[in-house]
Image: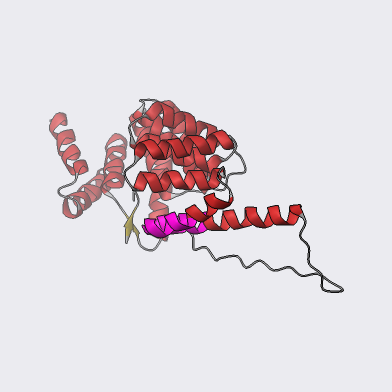
Amino acid sequence: MKSVSGCFTAVVPLLVALFITGCVTTTDSRFTREADRQKAVENYVQLSTAYIGQGNIERARQHLDRALELEPNSPSALAAQGLVYHSDGDPELAEQSFRRAISEDGGYTRARVYYGAFLYSKGRFEEARDQFQAASRDTDYKDRSSVFYNLGMTQERLGQQDEAVGSYRRAVELSRGDARSLLSLSRVMVETGDIAGAARYYDRLLLRLERTEGLQHSPESLFTGIRISRFLGDVNRESSMVLQLKNQYPESVEYQQYKALISNDK
């Protein structure tokens, strides 16, 4: 069972076959060789990222070595290599790989996403924001909702609450109501004083929790609900959520924040 606040897909190796109608012939044109080489590189990169997702860094490295042997300047291979170096605890080499990938192809959005996440992990929030902002402009990127979510997180760390609201709202729109994005949006709207707006998105979150098997409240989602309920004077909902927070997460930071909240009220 997973909570609201807390992907790599399986990759099937591609079997390359050539079907030619009429008489059986072979072709050795430079175009065909180049296309096959690029496809092989991408297949190796896909396999390596799948292994990274599984935590099998050694197998990931083996496939990346093959990809880089075929195409030393492949942006996708260089970006994945950055992930491997980061996993190995080599931040300087990781950053070099991410920057090389972007230098080779400034339009390769995944490299910017990886680099932004790396910069965020190092506390370099302004640089991370810039990478996520650049990535968010790619309307063809398949996981734009996560890009906007990451951008919102980074803007929060920079104290840019209004900008974070806009990014989280975009993440909600693109994900069609992802629970993580709904929670972050409603929480930041509470921080900015838009309680009515926060309540609307929080109600959508509660509906998602009810309808999604295995999804449950986190300390953050309960505390956000408590704050909204207190502002709106909904004593019954507040009491229910306080009880859940106390019973399920008595050692959480959020429960300590709640106790500080009621202490200040007194």
Q: Quadrant of the N terminus?
A: bottom left
Q: Is residue 122 magenta?
A: no
Q: Nearer the viewer, residue 114 or 164?
A: 114
Q: Is residue 155 visible?
A: yes
Specify the quadrant of the image occupied by residue 184: top left
Q: Is residue 114 left or right of residue 195?
A: right
> What are the residue bounds of the magenta stretch?
45-63
Q: Is residue 38 left or right of residue 264?
A: right
Give the percent coordinates (x, y) of residue 111.
51, 41
Q: Main secondary structure of the magenta part?
A: helix
Q: Nearer the viewer, residue 153 or 198?
A: 153
Specify the quadrant of the image occupied by residue 12: bottom right
Q: Is residue 185 visible?
A: no
Give the percent coordinates (x, y) of residue 158.
36, 26
| Figure colour scheme | secondary structure
Q: Nearer the viewer, residue 84 or 249?
A: 84
Give the percent coordinates (x, y) of residue 224.
30, 41
Say if 55 sits above or below 118 in the image: below
Residue occupying the far right of the picture: 22
Residue at (43%, 48%) from the top-left corner?
204
Say if 8 sits above or below 150 in the image: below
Residue at (52%, 43%) from the top-left corner?
110
Q: Nearer the viewer, residue 128 or 65?
A: 65
Q: How many marks?
A: 0
Residue at (43%, 42%) from the top-left corner?
201
Say if 242 sits above or below 27 in the image: above
Q: Quadrant of the C terminus?
A: top left
Q: Is residue 163 left or right of residue 124?
A: right
